[in-house]
Image (cartoon, grey):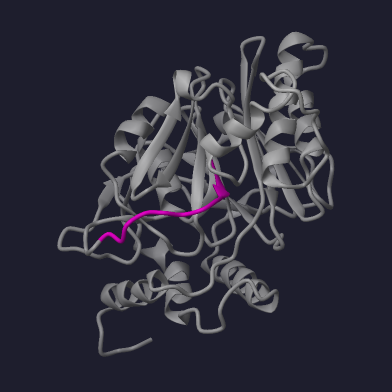
Amino acid sequence: MNRGIPYPLFIFLALGFLTAGSARPEGACTAFVMRGGGAVFLAKNLDWPVGEGVVFVNKRDVAKEAFGGGGSAPLRWTSKYGSVTFNQFGREFPLGGINERGLAIEELSTQWDYPPPHGQPCLNEFQWIQYHLDTCRSVKEVLKSAAGLKVSRLLLGLHYLIADRKGNAAVVEFNDGRMTAYSGDSLPVAVLSNNRYAESLRYLGLHQGFGGERRVSGGAESSERFVRAATALREYRFLGQRPLLDHAFVVLKSVSQEDTQWSIAYNLPRRVLFFKTREHRRYKIIPLEGLDFSCRSPAMMLPVSTESAGNLIRDLIPYNPQENRRLLDAVFRALRDLGELDEDFPQAVVEGMAAYPELCRCRR
């Protein structure tokens, strides 16, 4: 690390390099929200060439500052709620998760169009998820909070599917230099793939059951997966012959790809998450009510690739900074080997992400 520049500033300058336009990895995923019989599920496939990942238990009452700094008044907050997240880029930088109030957020890659923060306090696309899991208990609170935030791109252009335990759902995107949110009447279908939501909705309208004549196809393209998931949700609403959890995984299988690494379904009212991996197809279960979210107890973690099935609470182990660093090194090495990331991606950023959890402090 450059000893002539203070740590946060050096990371901020490296992040500026990324904004200038190094190559970014892209992926293809599908997510949706299902409702029925008093249950609400947010479900998602991670379709992506890298399978490394860790489940983290994140604590409440932890003071944090946005990674990389920037601006004279960096964004600071203290987590109100504990959460469980799926991470590939280290602790505090999740791809998605659920908090103890039954709020779940998942990201999917898409076109990115957001203006540079110009030195204003901001969050990167992964911390955007953790920040809202830390501080919000409903979709309404997320939308209110997100409207006042600046977002910077660290690696991926993302949009987000959000749902809460009452069955509310929303999509958040960044279009034409501003945040766009869909909820209520503007979100007639709670499905998200990799096209922008309005574009997917227009394509859906060409198909049977949604105003058009086209039949559903088995294509792997983002638009075809969107239609397939939307159709499956519509059929469940009319038929509803199998348990909602089982049907969620049937839909996930129908939109899976060759590189689907894991499939998740969050039961939001019950605050239980279920997931499967490509190697292990039995349900892995983490009930949040069985977790200790006090920041005085050790943070916990578990490799996504664990061979265990059923309730995983006893399989969780205390957080290990070395394992967090190994995760980051493995993921970034895999992305470089696959040609998904520029060779000159700043190593200082990787080091900063690995060290970042040590800067987050329990306030109790």
60 horizontally vs 322: left or right: left
Residue 337 or 285: which is nearer the viewer? 337
Is residue 98 in view from this perspective? no
x and y percent of residue 164 in the render?
49, 25
Main secondary structure along the magenta-highlighted residues? loop
* Image vertical order of residue 239 relative to residue 174, above or below: above
Question: Can you say whether 45 is above or below 345 in the image?
Answer: above
Position of residue 317 measured from the top left corner of the image (x, y, whole percent):
62, 53
Q: Position of residue 15 (x, y in %)?
A: 37, 71
Residue that lies at the very extreme toward the left in this rendered image = 72
Evaluate whether residue 66 shows in this view: yes
Q: Quadrant of residue 271?
A: top right
In this image, 51 relative to 92: left or right?
right
Q: Which residues are magenta?
A: 105-117
Residue at position x 24%, y 65% in the image: 70
The residue located at (41%, 46%) in the rendering is 175
Would residue 244 be found to the left or right of residue 53 on screen? right
The image shows residue 71, relative to residue 12, as above or below, that is: above
Measuring 67% from the left and 20% from the top, which residue is drawn there?
210
